[in-house]
Image (cartoon, rainbow, N blue to C red):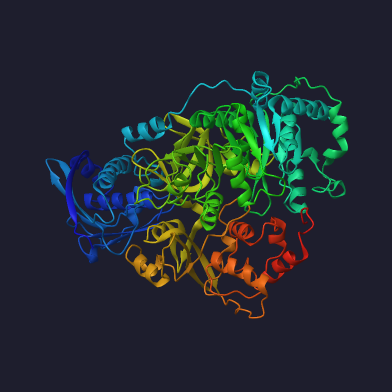
Amino acid sequence: MAARQSFDGLMEKLQVSRLQDRAAQLHTDLDRVLRVGLATLLHRYTGQEVVHIAAGGSSLDSSLTYRPDSTLRTLLESMCESDRPSPILFGVNMSAHTLKDRPEHALMVGLTEEEDRLKWHLRFDPAHLDAELLQRAMTHYAVLLDSLTTAPDAAVGHLGLLSEAERETMLTRWNDTTVPVEERCIHEHFQLTAAAAPDAPALIQDDLLHTFGMVNAEANRLAHFLAGYGVASGIQVGICLERSPELLVAMLGVMKAGAAYVPIDPEQPTQRMREMVTAADCLLTLTRGHLMSPADFAETQVLVWDEVRDQIATQPTRNPTAPVSPTDLCYVIFTSGSSGNPKPIAIRHRGVYNNLLDLNDLLAIGEHDRIVNVSSQGFDMSVYELLGLCLNGGAVVLPSVGRQRDLAHLVDLLRRHAVTVWSSTPSLLGAILNDLDYRGDDGTLPIRFFMIAGDWIPTDLPDRARRRAPGAAFVALGGATEASVYSTYFQVGAVDPAWTSIPYGVPMRNQRAYILDKNDQPVPCGVAGELHLAGMGLAQGYFRRPDLTAERFIDWSFGSTAERLYRTGDLARYRSDGGIELLGRLDFQVKINGIRVELGEVEKALRGLTGVREAVVVVRQAGATARLVGYVVPEADAVVDPDVLRADLMRVLPRYMVPGAIAILPELPLNMHGKLDRNLLPVPEAERSEFAASMDETEQRIAAVFEELLDVESLARNASLIELGADSMIMLQAMSRIDSHLDWQDMLESPTIAELAERLRTGPASRGVSR
């Protein structure tokens, strides 16, 4: 253990006489009040329900249990009668991440009287703590002692911790983001851009250029056509189309008609699409015949684009005058729900419009900028990709239909159309960089801004991206679908070697962020709490789901601050500079043998080990026994040993927090949106099929690709590639390496080496979406 350091601190608010008088009124002594105060501080910092304090010796240890209604008076009454006055010396642990109670003492707090005041002497282990954290903690201790003894019958979870200066800094100064913005609907701004530059390119696909004037005119025709079907303000219209010019026209046309569009990814199963059009109460849905069959959708009127094209073409091209305001709905978009049913989120024009313009200002977007739409229209990152640059005169480049997952095709689009802005999840960008490396492509990319969001960003990704695009800026974005796409940003400069992930950033224009504990009290800087979002970007709520809205959206006030907040469920903390650091999810808390473990903390420790690029931890249940299992993705060219990793973790975590098994993976499994899918994590040490010597040449070539991507020595021709860890990003890279004739449908429908080989032998599969 590192040598202990020490420092003294004197807090003017800790007047001994005042505390002694208040203790006497409670029929107790100062020592017990001080011990309860310190235990309560630890409880508030960590959320631990049971806190142990070693005071003066093992016979004087205290153990306090906290409940929602615990008060200073009830806590004093619960202390053992054998506890007696003692030298005021406490042994506790406070980790640099968040204060945790441990058997070993990383901090010793000594309190002595000095001129009617309490002076403390701190001895601490610099491997776990720093002086700045401790000084803040002692300030909170002083504030809490005063609050406790002033209101001994108040619930301790609702008492103040922050000094006035901290409240001003955290609640006001760090959220000082208000900027006057002319509120406008998105389609209205698009109309202004089209009027100013009608011949400028707005959309490019397959070398066909669609100008702003052309797109605006087609959207106007569609809007007038939809009005004939009763589409107006307060109506929702589903859009189930492939990436095509009609997709952008449909989005704008629905908005111009005064309605809200509902993006529906055509690759989803029919049942899920039915649930979506029902939940969003879609009056009608625009689609193509091979994507949605009208016979399957009694819940909505299905308009097949090719069947109504001629009718649309007869409509006027003038801008409609449908009444619509910035507070009306712009779109209803879905996220997965804990119950398994998709949740519809109602987003207003004003929130998403503010966000799009803010991003354009940050990136200095102009008429020469280009972006490739790589995100599904059902994923809210696509909103900026499809509409964002257009507002400032830039253009969107669409991949060829069916080739949105072709890595080589995407790279070709970047170079051929001089694309300047890249927007995606970190995993997709990583897959493209990996593919360039695999192919020995040393060429550069024309990107000047990387916008990365949606998941943890590996710390090596910014430098890898900037090597491919010299001079490019790398921006990390955070937020929630319930807050109009993005809420925080962080422009990455030099990556600090101490980082285990890229910081989450600071609130964007007209948006705010608060980190609160379970009692909705602001947590101090450096202490973990739940991230809450506020400001112009907040959704109206969950569409026609008042129960879900009331659960996640709350009216909150603290002092003079009053806000409507969205509870994100993300565990976060403030850094000393006001930046937000994301730590994990609140719902990843588990108990191992009755002890609560925060999986985010274990993951953070794993990511901090040498050679580890990414890490995730889950609980595996075997009968009545639960154990932690870790999954690690090594850094490039690093060789990591699970046993060595566990030994290293033993040095930084209590034994009960160290995973019993660690599996090494080439990449973490991801869903179709590029986010981590824990359900696809393979069971460690699972039996793998032996290599089948009877493979033919085609099968051996496919096996070699997957063996490299999955980092296994051998694969059987009939082994399930998905069960072995082949997530969507590995499938995407394999598709690129095996054969250009394979497409995404082939990969999904042929999940074994034998089946993929058969696809190649028989030629390209019939195209269309499998149901």
Query: Which residue lies at the image location 45% right of the left edge and 66% below the top edge?
Result: 594
Left or right: 420 as drawn, with respect to 87: right
> Closest to the observer: 86 or 339?
339
Whether residue 480 is situated above or below residue 621 in the rendered picture? above
Query: Which residue lies at the image location 57% right of the left edge and 20% below the top edge?
Result: 182
Res. 381 in view? no
Q: In the rendering, at what x and y percent does residue 240 appear? A: 75, 43
Left or right: 252 as drawn, with respect to 476: right
Res. 36 in view? yes
Q: In the rendering, at what x and y percent does residue 335 appear? A: 64, 47
Left or right: 284 as drawn, with respect to 578: right
Where on the picture, by quarter, is residue 54?
bottom left
Which quadrant would the C terminus be assigned to in this image?
Answer: bottom right
> Closest to the observer: 363 or 419?
419
Give the farthest residue toward the left.
115
Q: How many marks?
A: 0
Q: In the rendering, at what x and y percent does residue 242 appear? A: 73, 44
Q: In the rendering, at what x and y percent does residue 79 appear? A: 31, 58
Whether residue 464 is situated above or below residue 143 in the rendered picture? below
Which quadrant would the N terminus be assigned to in this image?
Answer: bottom left
> Closest to the observer: 576 or 523?
576
